[in-house]
Amino acid sequence: METQTLAQQTTVSIGICAVTEVENTLRLTGQILAASNPGLRIKELVIATDISQGMLNLLRQKISAKKLECIVPVQARAASISSIAPLFDGGKVRIAYSFNGALNLEPDIEKFPLELSKVVERGGYFVCSVRNILCLSETIAHAAVLQLDKIAPRRKQPTMVSVGGIDIPAFYYSTKFMSRLFEPYFKLKKLVGLPAFLPPAYLNDYCIRFRPVTSLLEKMETVLAERFPFNRLSDQTLFVFQRR
């Protein structure tokens, strides 16, 4: 009879994303560990952090409704993320992630890589998506309809966004800036444009009106989203970093 070893896989979410994304992350990390460690039974734990108490309260309601006791909401800023280390065994995690531009809301972004390095074990991974300071598809879409005052809207910083009913300043960053920021503590493994050719979500009307063109752009996404320079000129860039 095959014996099973119980192991806890702890993941840190920086900035709350949809609960379905947390569930998908739980499923994916569990599959990866199980495939590489036969006989290992995985106990998943996600520390979900956010700066907004309103967002945390919403997450708690969803956790209760879906009975996802493996998700633990914690109020914490990205720039002080090492403060949550006592919440998990050994104070280190294998995987941390931050999606949908949550890091764009951190005013002390320069402090974040060092703080993150204190909680991600050597060889571990940090996956994040960050909104770019220049989005080529956004620029082309506005230029095509002669909205010249909106060609480079992200150059004006910060932009105020609403999070949990509170207005927070958001900042846009180039891929070059982010890569250099993490370089002392993390190796850059991959860059992917999200999306590289399709316009940002707020311009979805263009996608509907010009469906034949957007169908072609969707096909280009699958081939070129990871290629230079398109992975640096997208709405968001997905970074995959590995801890040094």
Image: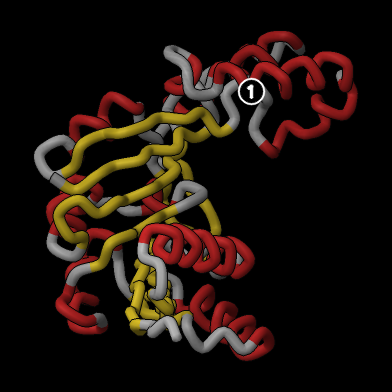
For image coordinates 46% across by 42% down, the residue present is: 159
Whether residue 81 sits left or right of residue 220 in the image: it is: left
Q: List x then y, in percent, for residue 173.
A: 35, 33
Q: How many marks?
A: 1
**Residue shown at 67%/26% (left/top)?**
199
Q: Is residue 163 left or right of residue 82?
A: right
Q: Nearer the viewer, residue 22 or 105?
A: 22
Residue 210 appears at what percent x and percent y?
Answer: 87, 19
Query: According to the image, label 1 marks what residue?
Result: 221
The quadrant of the picture occupied by the C terminus is top left
Q: Position of residue 200 (x, y in %)?
A: 64, 33
Q: Which residue lies at the image location 70% right of the left edge and 38% below the top edge?
A: 202
Which picture quadrant has residue 21? bottom right
Residues packed near mark 1 inside 10 Å, few (<14), some (14 to 19) or many (20 plus)? many
Give the colour scheme of this rendering. Answer: secondary structure
Name the side, left or right, on which 202 lies relative to 173: right
Against 46, residue 178 (above or below) is above
Name the residue nearer the viewer: 36 or 90: 36
Q: Quadrant of residue 185?
A: top left
Kind of residue sitting beneath label 1 = Glu
Circle 1 SS class:
helix
Which image quadrant: the N terminus? Answer: bottom left
Q: Position of residue 112 (x, y in %)?
A: 21, 53
Left or right for 152, reference 199: left
The outermost residue toward the front is: 1
Does residue 60 lie above or below 106 as drawn?
below
